[in-house]
Image: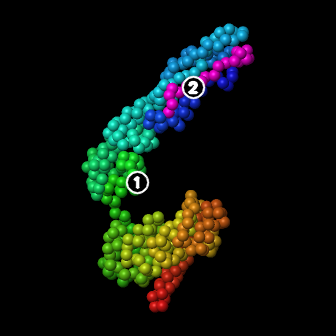
């Protein structure tokens, strides 16, 4: 049979592709209607070469019952005479396409909810963008849809409440429900308000953030006496910033197990497990200007964090993050799951940048990563103590110069 002749299943496949690419446009009233799908028409040669297939095609459409109109066309053939044949399926509305695709229920629900939200907030019609969230409109349960619209309405009416998420007076809208939908809520609020993006979830909703907790080890016995003997402290960042400590050096390590294993070091406080939030240390004013040492993984993300840390603590020295360390312990290296994207990382030294570029280019292998906990502890401890001593001595020299 000629490939031009489209059977119902082939038309359905085409309409599914069209629906998947266009249903959001259609939800906003776009698209050109009616939509006509040509079925092809057999030629004289088709009848002559494969009459049974042509008859099967005609029968398939004769028995078809579905959405839209089946248009017929009369053709005259030299041997067969006039024949009335199916020529096109004409679909007048998106819901007819949805019916072909088995999406009628989802489409109907999305259309209904779209209309409800536009009627409640007319600005959605002007700004466009609600259709991006077609799946939410189509698939949310009645309870979740009600929770979403209730939360949006409350935030719009109370844009600067300053409440914690747990304090929101919204029945059924609990913290776990919100945590799974923060991006959605921010996008919808931005759409409702117009103007510039309103930031992250807490900024967009005018809510109080959960205090950022930081873990600190007080390695100096003298400093510990000022804190009632506390050595290991995890507390909100603002509370740590309010302390009146006077350390002589700060050590930042990425791995928690490394941090808890650190021995006493005169004048030193250590922070661990900060990751990309290392910039939070800028809040702690009694750290500013101190000699600082950073030890993280020798991988692209570790070096990116190092760059961020140096932005927070200018003059910070890295340790065990150089090419010599990577090559010395090459047999202990593993693969980094995904590498940090190209960036300026302007705070890296030339030697550190060279390591970053080497890791990105595969100089030492594919996505090589040397995790700090793999380096033997005696070696690591010697390097840390030497780096801290060097940083403190350099600071002392600058102070007396």
Residue drawn at x 40%, y 74% is 217
First reached walking from the N terminus: tag 1 or tag 2: 2
Residue 267, above or below 107: below
Is residue 36 one of those drawn in magenta?
yes
Residue under label 1: 196
**Residue 377 disc label:** none
In the image, farthest residue toward the left: 169
Mark 2 surroundings within 10 Å by alpha-carbon count, few (fewer than 14), some (14 through 19), many (20 or more): some
Whole-Å distance between the Cαs marked 1 and 2?
42 Å
- Say whether residue 181 is visible: no
Mark 1 surroundings within 10 Å by alpha-carbon count, few (fewer than 14), some (14 through 19), many (20 or more): few
Residue drawn at x 32%, y 80% is 226
Q: Determine whether the residue tagged by mark 1 lies in a helix, strand or loop.
A: loop
Which percent across, then down, holds residue 399? Answer: 45, 88
Residue under label 2: 37
The N terminus sits in image quarter: top right
Q: Determine whether the residue tagged by mark 2 lies in a helix, strand or loop.
A: strand
Which quadrant of the view contains residue 88?
top right
Residue drawn at x 34%, y 44% is 148
């Amino acid at each position: 049979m000629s490939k031009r002749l489209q059977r119902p299943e082939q038309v359905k496949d085409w309409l599914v592709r069209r629906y998947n690419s266009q249903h959001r446009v259609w939800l906003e009233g776009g698209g050109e209607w009616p939509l006509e799908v040509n079925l092809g028409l057999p030629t004289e040669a088709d009848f002559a070469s494969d009459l049974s297939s042509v008859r099967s095609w005609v029968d398939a459409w004769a028995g078809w019952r579905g959405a839209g109109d089946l248009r017929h066309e009369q053709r005259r053939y030299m041997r067969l005479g006039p024949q009335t044949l199916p020529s096109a399926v004409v679909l007048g509305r998106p819901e007819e396409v949805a019916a072909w695709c088995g999406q009628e229920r989802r489409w109907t629900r999305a259309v209904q909810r779209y209309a409800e939200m536009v009627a409640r907030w007319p600005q959605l019609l002007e700004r466009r963008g609600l259709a991006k969230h077609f799946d939410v409109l189509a698939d949310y349960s009645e309870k979740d849809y009600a929770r979403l619209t209730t939360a949006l309405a409350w935030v719009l009416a109370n844009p600067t409440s300053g409440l914690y998420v747990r304090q929101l007076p919204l029945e059924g809208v609990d913290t776990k429900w919100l945590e799974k939908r923060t991006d959605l809520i921010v996008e919808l609020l931005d759409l409702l308000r117009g103007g510039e993006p309103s930031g992250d979830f807490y900024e967009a909703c005018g809510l109080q953030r959960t205090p950022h907790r930081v873990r600190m080890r007080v390695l100096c016995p003298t400093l510990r006496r000022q804190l009632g003997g506390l050595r290991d402290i995890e507390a909100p960042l603002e509370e740590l910033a309010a302390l009146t400590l006077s350390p002589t050096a700060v050590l930042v390590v990425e791995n928690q197990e490394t941090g808890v294993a650190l021995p006493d070091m005169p004048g030193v406080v250590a922070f661990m497990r900060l990751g990309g939030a290392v910039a939070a240390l800028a809040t702690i004013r009694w750290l500013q200007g101190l000699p600082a040492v950073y030890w993280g993984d020798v991988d692209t993300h570790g070096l990116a964090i190092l760059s961020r840390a140096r932005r927070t603590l200018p003059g910070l020295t890295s340790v065990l993050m150089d090419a010599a360390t990577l090559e010395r312990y090459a047999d202990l290296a593993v693969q980094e799951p995904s590498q940090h994207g190209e960036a300026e990382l302007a705070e890296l030294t030339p030697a550190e940048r060279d390591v970053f570029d080497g890791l990105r280019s595969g100089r030492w292998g594919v996505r090589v990563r040397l995790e700090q906990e793999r380096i033997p502890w005696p070696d690591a401890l010697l390097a840390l103590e030497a780096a801290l001593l060097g940083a403190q001595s350099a600071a002392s020299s600058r102070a007396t110069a």
